Image (spheres, grey):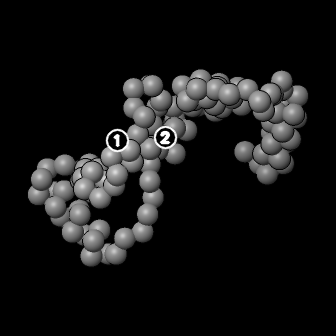
Amino acid sequence: MSETSERQREAELHAWALAGDFNPALRLSAEQAAASNRAILAAAGLDVDAFERKMSIPAWDGANDDMTISFSASRDSCESAKKLAMLQGRDRSDLLRDALSEYLVAHAPRQVAA
């Protein structure tokens, strides 16, 4: 796609978004928001499944309420976690999720560690 046609397409999408009937006060459930976002991407002409794969966005099925947390850790801690997860035959994410849960149970008041 040429730069001119890309800019034209962006202008068309911008006009389309401005012409929409959007209500900022409307609150959607996570499942509704995911469906709405997929519909917007599809209406913009994108292959939604390919886009989600490329962006590593898991499909929302309503069954998983897990959240992603990003934090910095020392190289040694990261390597140790990777090795321990491999030894235990599981993902590093599973290891860190369990470690966080155990830490919260041991150190947080009951209301927080729920």
- Position of 6 with respect to 94 (left or right) is right
* Residue 12 image offset from top left, x and y in percent: 85, 35
Q: Is 54 rendered above or below residue 108?
A: above
Question: Could you classify mark 1 by the number of other residues whose Cα lies within 10 Å: few (under 14), some (14-19), or many (20 or more)?
Answer: few
- Give residue 114's mark: 1
Disc 2: which residue: 57
Q: Residue at x 27, y 51 (%)?
A: 105
Element at label 1: loop
Distance between mark 2 and mark 1 Cα atoms: 27 Å
Q: Is residue 28 at all visible to an observer of this figure?
A: yes
Q: Secondary structure at mark 2?
A: loop
Q: Residue at x 16, y 61 (%)?
A: 84
Residue 106 percent location from the top left of the image: 25, 56
- Residue at position x 39%, y 48% in the image: 112
Q: Which mark is residue 45?
A: none
Q: Quadrant of the N terminus?
A: top right
Note whether 5 is above or below 62 in the view shown. below
Q: Residue furthest left?
A: 87
- Where's residue 90, x and y in %? 19, 49
Q: Give me the residue at 51% from left, 31% from top.
A: 49
Residue 15 appears left or right of 86 = right
Pair 2/1: label in front: 1
Residue type, mark 2 in image: Ile
Q: Quadrant of residue 5?
A: top right
Q: Earlier in the sequence, mark 2 or mark 1?
A: 2
Residue in front for this viewpoint, 69 or 75? 69
> At label 1, which amino acid type do we have?
Ala
